[in-house]
Image: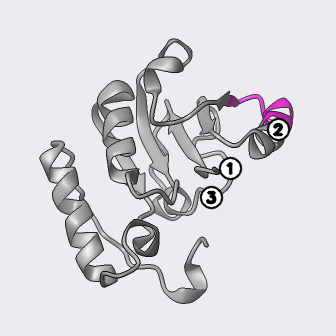
């Protein structure tokens, strides 16, 4: 099961364009540390190879559903970016945000409606996920809908 990229960074990047498009194994905060959690061993191998070239990337091969397993490797962070395509992705973000996100920090989540509920409309899925975030005391500041040519799948 491939969870996709999960990135935590200790140096907030103010450029929204860059922060919004930090996709597969990219650096969010040049000059800071970027912990990238990858569950898949195949993709994890690629991540380790990249981390050897980019010293600001710290590869963590682990399931993001279990932050206690990698808690000792990661400091408090300014930004969490998640693109996991799982039915429980909002819970994964919340769990890691409660564990690693500094007060005043931010999260970016790529919600793939079809991965959560393929029978429901995308709007209904988005509304449900926002409600889950609010229940976890996570307050989304902005919601963007990607056009078909911008989607990550």
Q: Which residues are magenta?
A: 48-59
Picture quadrant where residue 92 is located: top left
Inter-mark Cα distance, 1 to 2: 15 Å
Residue 137: % across, % down: 15, 42
Which label sits on residue 26?
A: 1
Residue 81: % across, % down: 48, 48
Image vertical order of residue 52 relative to residue 110, above or below: above
Query: How many other residues sit within 10 Å of disc 1, few (<14), some (14-19) or many (≥20)?
Result: some
Residue placed most toward the observer, 122 or 152: 122
Q: Nearer the viewer, mark 3 or mark 2?
A: 2
Residue drawn at 30 percent across, 69 percent down: 143
Q: Disc 1 vs disc 3: Cβ atoms closer than 8 Å?
A: yes
Picture quadrant where residue 62 is located: top right
Residue 37: % across, % down: 60, 36
Residue drawn at 59 percent across, 56 percent down: 22
Whether the magenta-drawn stretch holds residue 86 is answered as no
Q: Disc 1 vs disc 2: Cβ atoms closer than 8 Å?
A: no
Name the residue carrying label 2: 45
Image vertical order of residue 146 relative to residue 69, above or below: below
Residue drawn at 44 percent across, 19 percent down: 68
- What is the quadrant of the C terminus in the image? bottom right
How many marks on residues? Answer: 3
Residue drawn at 39 percent across, 66 percent down: 116
Whether the magenta-drawn stretch holds residue 54 is answered as yes
Q: Earlier in the sequence, mark 1 or mark 2?
A: 1
Residue 102: % across, % down: 32, 28
Picture quadrant where residue 24 is located: bottom right
Query: How many other residues sit within 10 Å of disc 2, few (<14), some (14-19) or many (≥20)?
Result: some
Image vertical order of residue 41 relative to residue 74, above or below: below
Which label sits on residue 23?
A: 3
């Amino acid at each position: 099961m491939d969870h996709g990229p999960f990135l935590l960074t200790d140096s907030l990047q103010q450029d929204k364009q860059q922060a919004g498009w930090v996709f597969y194994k990219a650096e969010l905060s040049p000059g800071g540390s970027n912990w990238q959690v990858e569950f898949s061993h195949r993709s994890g191998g690629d991540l380790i190879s990249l981390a050897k070239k980019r010293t600001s990337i710290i590869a963590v091969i682990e399931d993001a559903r279990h932050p206690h397993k990698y808690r000792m490797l990661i400091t408090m962070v300014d930004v969490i970016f998640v693109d996991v395509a799982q039915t429980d992705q909002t819970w994964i973000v919340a769990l890691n945000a409660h564990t690693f996100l500094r007060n005043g920090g931010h999260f970016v989540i790529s919600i793939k409606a079809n991965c959560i509920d393929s029978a429901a409309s995308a709007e209904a899925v988005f509304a449900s996920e926002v409600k889950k975030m609010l229940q976890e005391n996570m307050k989304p500041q902005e919601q963007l809908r990607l056009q078909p040519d911008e989607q990550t799948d």
